[in-house]
Image: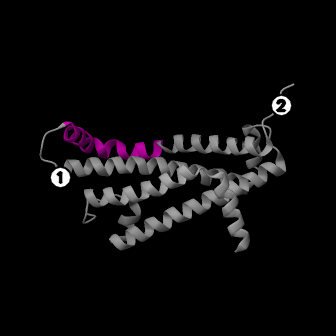
Amino acid sequence: MKSLLIKIRVGAILAPALIVIIYFLFGCLDLITTYLASPDLKHENNWVYRTFNLNWPLLIAYTIFLYIVMTFLLLISLQYLKNCFEEHKFSSFNKILIHSKKNIKLLITVVIIGIFYSHLISIGLVIVNNFLSYVYLQSNKENWLKNISVFYVNRQKYFLFFIQYIVVIPGYILAFMKVNKIRLRTIGKPHVD
C-alpha cells in the first residue's frame, strides 16, 4: 500500500494539477447538465446507464468511481513513465513508440494517458450536448441559443456518435505531448554539437 501511495505522489507531481481539477469539474458539470436535460434520466444516452438501468444515486456513484479510478491510473502511469525514461533515456518520442512494442507496460501506460485526455475532451462535448438539449427541451422563446439548440438536436443523432470518437485523436495528441514533455524533463533536452 505504501508503494502505491509513493507512486501516486510521484505521479501527482508530474500531472498538471489544473487538468485534474478541470477533469473533476467537468464530471460535476456533466452530472448537473444531465439533470437539467433529463431529471428522470429518460433521455440519458450513457451506455453504462442504459445497460445497467441505473438510477441517480447509482449514476452518481458510478461517475465518482470512474473519475477517481481514471485519475489514479493517470498518476500511476505518469510515475511509471518517469521511471522508464530514467532507465532507458529515450532520445526521441519515436524510440518510445518502438520500445513500447517490446514493453507492454509502457504501451498500456501511453494508452491510459490517451484515454484520460480523450475522456476529458469527450466530457466537455457531453456538457455542451446536455446543455443544448436542456435549452431545446425547456425554452419556448426564440433566441439565438434556442436556434442553435434546435439545429444541434435535430442533427445530433447523425454526428454525436462520430464526434465523440473523433475526440480520441486530440486526446492522444495531448497524451503524446505530455509523454514527450515528461521525457524531456526526465532525461533533459538533447544537446546539439
Q: Earlier in the sequence, mark 2 or mark 1?
A: 1
Residue 9 appears anywhere in the view: yes
Residue 63 place in picture, x, y as percent:
44, 65
Depth order, front residue of 22/120: 22
Q: Is residue 86 above or below residue 34?
A: above
Spatial CA span between label 2 and label 1? 60 Å
Residue 84 place in picture, x, y as percent:
78, 52
Magenta run includes residue 51: no
| Residue position for label 2 | 191
Residue 108 appears anywhere in the view: no
Magenta run includes residue 156: yes
Q: Nearer the viewer, mark 2 or mark 1?
A: 2
Q: Is residue 134 left or right of residue 178?
A: left
Q: Residue at x 26, y 58 (%)?
A: 36
Q: Is residue 68 left or right of residue 44?
A: right
Q: Is residue 170 left or right of residue 157?
A: right
Instruction: Specify the quadrant that holds the N terminus.
Output: bottom right
Q: Is residue 147 left or right of residue 58?
A: left
For the residue marked with disc 2, what is the amino acid? His
Give the magenta range.
144-166
Q: Quadrant of residue 109?
A: bottom right
Residue 8 place in picture, x, y as percent:
66, 63
Q: Quadrant of residue 172?
A: top right
Residue 4 place in picture, x, y as percent:
69, 69
Q: Residue at x 65, y 50 (%)?
A: 110
For the residue marked with disc 1, what is the amino acid? Gln
As drawn, the label of residue 170 is none
Instruction: Specify the quadrant that holds the C terminus.
Output: top right
Q: Residues within 10 Å of mark 2 (few under 14, many from 20)?
A: few
| Residue position for label 1 | 138
Q: Residue at x 61, y 54 (%)?
A: 112
